Image: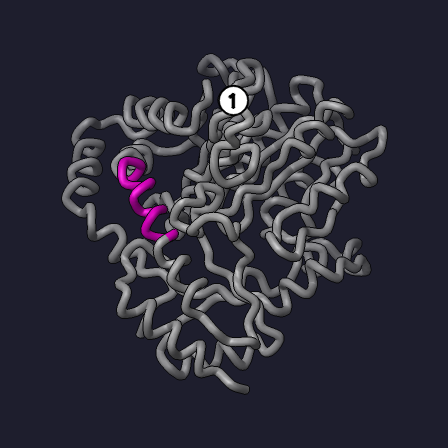
Amino acid sequence: MIKFLDIQKINAQYADELKAATARVIDSGWYLQGSELANFEKELADYTGVKHAIGVANGLDALRLILKGYIETGVMQEGDEVIVPANTYIATILAITDNRLKPVLVEPDIHTYNLDVSLVEKHITPRTKAIMVVHLYGRVCWSEELEAIAKKYKLKIIEDNAQSIGAQFTPCNTVLNKESHRAPQKTGSLGDAAAFSFYPGKNLGALGDAGVVTTNDDKLAETVRALGNYGSKQKYVHEFQGLNSRMDEIQAAILTVKLHYLDAENQKRREIAQYYCTHIKNEKLTLPIVNNELSIMNCIDNVWHLFVIRCFERDCLQQYLANHDIQTLIHYPTPPYKQGAYKLLNNLSFPITEQIHNEALSLPISPVMDMQEVTKITQIINSFEK
């Protein structure tokens, strides 16, 4: 069986370091808001290129706390609108509605699966306060057009960076534009604030739940840190109606170890994506659209958290691969606005989003796959004929 993602094998690479980090925390007797978290926050902030990184309990809380922070600081108020892609995991939408804000759904680009920036401006109203972009599947969702729109309407840009840690944006979205002096910039530092998830299956995965908020905004950072600690900046003094959302010391220690290997692991994902895109030859499939001027291994705008293909006969293909002991997953079978949680939105229709959800299939991709497995998957896919 070729697993979709062998998390045990990924962590086994660094088992000795992870065990030493865990033992260090256990022996310290300090398990929350200690030196391990402070160290990881600093390392992640430096890696991302931001002033502040605030450890929280998970990626959803990171998004929730950013929006709650903007409400507490007067940037937003209940009923304000947040533009968000219709094609995303439900957590992105949950964070908005949990803060009694209104999600304004916008179709994705069928080629990138990310928010179609060309459609954003027509959805802006006097109540619009932010654009929430999702770097879906590991691919940067950013453009200078997006920046100009946000500046024109004085909107915040919030990044859902749950899937794309390590990816970088440049003016041409791949390599440094020689006509520009703007250097590549990592996701998580592009917008006004960003949310990270370290769910175990992510490119940088914890051994449990964990998340981070990054920002260069001092006031927002201070507010988010307090909100995640029961609304308290000082013990037993509660300025806000906050949450209990803190990254523990063990997860921080583990993530510090794994952060040092992230770039190398992301590059291995690019190598696998390169092989898939070069060798999968089946007219029934739509492969990810990539920059034709560069090899995938030189494209820094994608860290390939997922390798998503589309197939009109998706369910048959998935069963066919399962019959050949290849595990695949669907990201995601049902759009958020068609879920029972959002019954009032069930009548909405977004044809491009629905096409993606009906056809998408994620193939195995991870830094611990060997090329024999990748070759086998490719050969079997190429023989799919139904």
Image position of 155 with respect to 350: above or below: above
Residue visible at 55% across and 76% down?
A: 283
Would you identify the image quadrant in which residue 76 lies? top right
Image position of 233 with respect to 6: above or below: above
Name, please, the residue furthest toward the bottom: 386
Q: Report crowding for label 1: few under 14, some 14 to 19, many 20 or more residues within 10 A (C-alpha).
A: few
Q: Main secondary structure of the magenta part?
A: helix
Q: Position of residue 109 (x, y in %)?
A: 67, 52
Q: Is residue 269 magenta?
A: yes
| Quadrant the N terminus occupies | bottom left
Would you identify the image quadrant in which residue 43 lies? top left
| Quadrant the C terminus occupies | bottom right
Residue visible at 44% across and 45% down?
A: 299
Residue visible at 51% across and 35% down?
A: 169
Q: Which residue is mark 1?
A: 181
Q: Position of residue 122 (x, y in %)?
A: 83, 40
Residue 230 in sight from this viewpoint: no
